[in-house]
Amino acid sequence: MHPLDRLFKPKSIAVVGASTDEYKAGYQMMYALRAFPGELYPINPKSDDILGFKAFSSLEAIGKPVDLVILTIPAAGCADVMQQAGEAGAGAALIIGGGFAETGASGRAVQQDLLTICRKYGMRMLGPNTAGFANPCVGVTANFNPWIGGVPAGSIGLVSQSGAMSLVLSALIHTQNLGISLATGVGNSADVGVADVVEYLADDTGTKVIVLYLEGVIDGRRLYDAVRNAVKKKPVLFLTVGQANIAEFAVSHTGNLIGSYQIKTAALKQAGAIMANSSDDLIDAADLFSRTRLEPKENPGVGLLTGQAGPGMVIADYLRSKGILIPELKPTTIEKIRQALPPLTYIKNPVDTGRPGPSFPSVLKAMAADSSIDILITFLLDEPAVVEPITLFRELRDIRLPMIFGTSGFPENIQPVQKALSVMDIASFASPDRAAKAVCAFVDDAKAAYRFVRYEEAVPSLPNIERLEQTPDEAEAKDILGRIGIPTPRRVVCRTHEEAKRAFSSLPQPCVLKILDPAVTHKTEAGGVILHIKTEEQLANALERIDRIKVQGNRRYLVEEMAPDGLELIIGATNDRSFGPVVLVGLGGITAEAIKDTTMRLAPLGLNEAMDMIAELRGKSLFEGWRGSPALDRESVARAIVALGLFMVSHPEIKEVDLNPVRVCEKGLLALDALFAL
Amino acid sequence: MHPLDRLFKPKSIAVVGASTDEYKAGYQMMYALRAFPGELYPINPKSDDILGFKAFSSLEAIGKPVDLVILTIPAAGCADVMQQAGEAGAGAALIIGGGFAETGASGRAVQQDLLTICRKYGMRMLGPNTAGFANPCVGVTANFNPWIGGVPAGSIGLVSQSGAMSLVLSALIHTQNLGISLATGVGNSADVGVADVVEYLADDTGTKVIVLYLEGVIDGRRLYDAVRNAVKKKPVLFLTVGQANIAEFAVSHTGNLIGSYQIKTAALKQAGAIMANSSDDLIDAADLFSRTRLEPKENPGVGLLTGQAGPGMVIADYLRSKGILIPELKPTTIEKIRQALPPLTYIKNPVDTGRPGPSFPSVLKAMAADSSIDILITFLLDEPAVVEPITLFRELRDIRLPMIFGTSGFPENIQPVQKALSVMDIASFASPDRAAKAVCAFVDDAKAAYRFVRYEEAVPSLPNIERLEQTPDEAEAKDILGRIGIPTPRRVVCRTHEEAKRAFSSLPQPCVLKILDPAVTHKTEAGGVILHIKTEEQLANALERIDRIKVQGNRRYLVEEMAPDGLELIIGATNDRSFGPVVLVGLGGITAEAIKDTTMRLAPLGLNEAMDMIAELRGKSLFEGWRGSPALDRESVARAIVALGLFMVSHPEIKEVDLNPVRVCEKGLLALDALFAL
């Protein structure tokens, strides 16, 4: 038995605060649970009977431990009841009401007390501040919005930081004739959080796809691990907010900071989860995944057969714009199709039948037999006199590829067809666009799974570097980079003009003179970096200019060799409060910085994954020999990212590393500046 | 009477090729038209009666002119019938079948013959190669897919380059409980094209919103003008394809080249049309616009009231990420709301009621009375026991602001509510995301209309410059730029080293030496540009290096002053085969070019519109004083764009102008290179 089974698959439930007053949550909860097939105990000292269930004066009065205690009482009374629940041997508690961490410091303290009680008695707790959950597979509707109990049992496991969004998504699931294995809010996530439920659903054999709605993620690293493990077994889809500034509203909701949207989405994608852009897209993708999943593949091929050109074009355009492959069919396949269709139709893939007719199934069979095709989409306007979809797919039942159906017509005509297809396990969508979006998520999942195979590589080890006790200056930071294998320019630290002069003559020229002072973080803006020094006279002038910058303590200089020409990048790392060590790469130079062309990954990561980070940059063509210049050494960049990631993992005392710029050349790179923050 | 009324509002129709064979288009068409309230004449010499209508042997046999002749016969017979239709005084023709321009040159010739006949007799022609149209307002279903006749009469005017997409969109309109004033495909657009129908619908009093589906646009400039005029009267929405490479498929569909996606979308947005990203989004926006439209406003304020935080967050995050303003409510409004709601809810806007209750209408009224709010969105989970939406909106009927309702629940419960709200002219959407997307389009329309007011400005005039007979070299091109007011560096054209030396000493130093030869278009890559020349010796070396480049004809040099530091841009123009003169601005330098950060507009355009082009660049912050550098002279860039646009309009012989780079400084700019192509 899984530890969360007493919460999500209880055999006995007590409702503390159960009420006969229709306007109270304690009534709503009892009403929602009225069909619960296990034992249901309303707790209310003032009533004998609530909705036909015998009421008890206290948890103790039941006389035996229950699996789940639901609290529908004000915040102030919760700690007492939790104590009683623990003493009575309850397995889990669900706290619906608000008034805890989302309200500020005192609420946070009360919430912490509840958690302490849970830990003491080995109870699990869902909430507080959540709508609850529903598990139709075992007949539990523990939700203050009873209609969620009408969603049939199915294979979609849904976990949401917002109770209302669990209802929004459940309603869409129901609208699509699908069902849930579990739908739960987690509210303030005091104990059971999204990661716990993801782990639970990953192990749940009835769940075929996991669907997440996230706001601010508290323990991002744990969620990342949970998702990464889950996607080995089943697809994980997510929808999240935070691309715009809604921070204040979000804190008022669940008490969690919204965090960095870029880190959150990068981490979940890195873990293999597929991001949806809307609730509707999320559930359409879940529809498809609840039936089938593609094998891991680098670039699966989509075969598209359309009865009408326009909708086919909409689908093909969307898929190609998202990097989905619609490969040209093999000549033998094209020849088979040519014989089945009238002349002048487009048959290379997409295949446009012109006016669809009796040859439709044979064309689909020919496409399915083509080895370049891994998934088939069919679009047909509702014209049952021409092609009847149910008959069509019955005829195609020997095809082993995933098949998706798109159609358009009046709901009263197409919905019965869609229901019938759903029973045949064919996902169907009532517009070409919806079919295309679902297929895109479907293929992206197979691509992500394929990448994981490539990512299972030996991560290099780093020399052991002692914990940093104080912020290193640029020269010290560069020494550290050198030890972890990130090249830096040759340099000499100098305290006097004389030392600088000696350093200048010892280095290849031209040289760079920099101020060396950890307090001056924007050296260039302060006039503390002088490039292209070719003569001693120029050096003397440069030293004089630098001496005009005010410093505290002893003045020091850094004399460095000039780096060769190349492309400027930013490589950085941060220690995110939720997700831990994160590495970043982006194009450098002021233009690129203004455009913010960057990609991120959680560290540690291997070389292949770091190479993929570079491939995701909008300006990636700059690495590939731009306008006749030589191709640049991407692998040196990837190696630097990997090394910096490993370094961050073993140095939690570092808050941020900023290598800006890093110059990458035809062969190798040099980190020209290095800024560490503890 | 509008010239297209005999096509789209016919009082009499003849169907040539009418048939009793259910598998023929001539049957489908008769079946679709069986309820036509006017006169319907099947033309078939072998039948007396088709579907209960007396058949005629020929158009002539009818004995009087009909408004609309529909041809459901093969391509080969169409010219003869068109000739007869013209002689019989028909007003318009609709040709369903394919086999014309979409099949290649010979088909194109046949199509041209049909057009010649139309022009001769003053007939209009829809098609060929189209599904036809439906106009339920006058009871015409002239479409080979008869179910489109089931879409009720309404206020959405729909025109599609694909017949099937007109059906896809009509089905979605019906699904939303909406209706159409016209839904038509245009097929090959031999005569009546999208622009004609847009003009027609703009004048049609029954049409409140125009919806377009576009593939390759033939006469883009006319469409631009038609849309720009239409949006003065009613909103125009569009969906298009072509962001990915689907060119070959598109040509096979309607015979039209797909053209530049960037130019097409930029032109339609410039004309004030609102782009949708999917069929579903398109019809959701049309739903809202079919009821109401915002007054032009620079930045309308959205008030968002939600019964549940999560969905409110989804809506707020989407809107803010699209630049939609959700302003903080005024203190007096907040105070009113505070009194109406329990403590601890978020009430600045979005307003989150916590658990919604009886105060819901008063909160909405308070928000509506706030002068910063122009449009109200309300989201409520389906909980009629808590707030009943129909009662709610009845209570709010005095609110004059546009109101949008979002909800989630089981379709069997919420759809009856949505239907009732639709009758009350409240648009409602069954997910928070759909409500948010529709509102975004709604606000964007008001913003576009506001921009038009700003764009009504005097466009400066240019000096008259004679038609160019041959491609100018760089120096000649720069002379032309100088005459139209785009500054260039001081320069001297030289034929000998001696001349170059004289030029060098006459210009401020350092100088630039360039090869001057129209055949060398990539001068830098060829080694034909040498910067930073400070001494005569450096000049001599530079001349020698340039002399190594092979040229045909006489060798010439350009000696120029060096430009001051600044930001590099690209300013360009092209003469698009469909849309005519187009101007472009983008960030320059290799990084920016690789990232392709550019915006486009059709020319001519005024200064305010050119300023908006700059504001749309991703890297626009570079103009605003990046990292302590001074703000750059955006207006000089806008002036250059305006001048180049006017020049392109008066010089149709020019195919392309490429000013790359243009260097913009704190004050003014300099075009450092100029390439003209005729």
Image: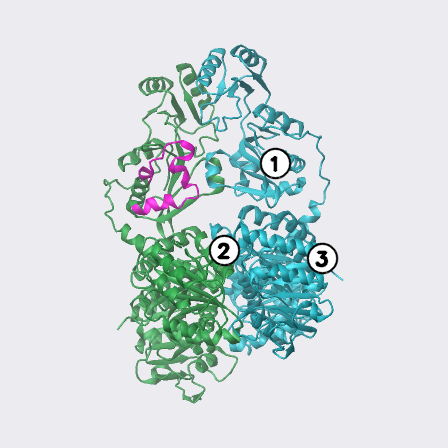
Chain colours: A cyan, B green
> Share a chain, discs 1 and 3?
yes
- Magenta-colored stretch includes residue A132: no
Mark 1 belongs to which amino acid?
Answer: Arg
Distance Cα–Cα, label 1 vs label 3: 54 Å
Please identify the quarter of the rendering in which residue B254 is found.
bottom left
Q: Which residue is mark 3?
A: A121
Please identify the quarter of the rendering in which residue B480 is found.
top left
Residue at 61% in and 50% down = A269
Farthest residue in the right direction?
A: A1
Q: Which residue is mark 2?
A: B247
Q: Which residue is mark 1?
A: A634
Question: Mark 3, chain letter?
Answer: A
Judge from the rendering whether residue B105 lies leftward or rightward of residue A613; answer left or right. Answer: left
Question: Mark 1, chain letter?
Answer: A
Which of discs 2 and 1 lies nearer the camera? The answer is 1
Classified by dominant secondary structure, the portion drawn in magenta counts as helix
Mark 2 belongs to which amino acid?
Answer: Ala
Mark 3 belongs to which amino acid?
Answer: Tyr
Judge from the rendering whether residue B678 lies leftward or rightward of residue A656; answer left or right. Answer: left
In terms of sequence position, does the residue under pointer 1 or pointer 3 come before the other?
Answer: 3
Up/down of B557 relative to B648, above or below: above
Residue at 66% in and 51% down = A298
Where is residue A572? Give x, y as percent: 57, 36
Judge from the rendering whether residue A249 lies leftward or rightward of residue B57; answer left or right. Answer: right
Up/down of A647 relative to B46, above or below: above
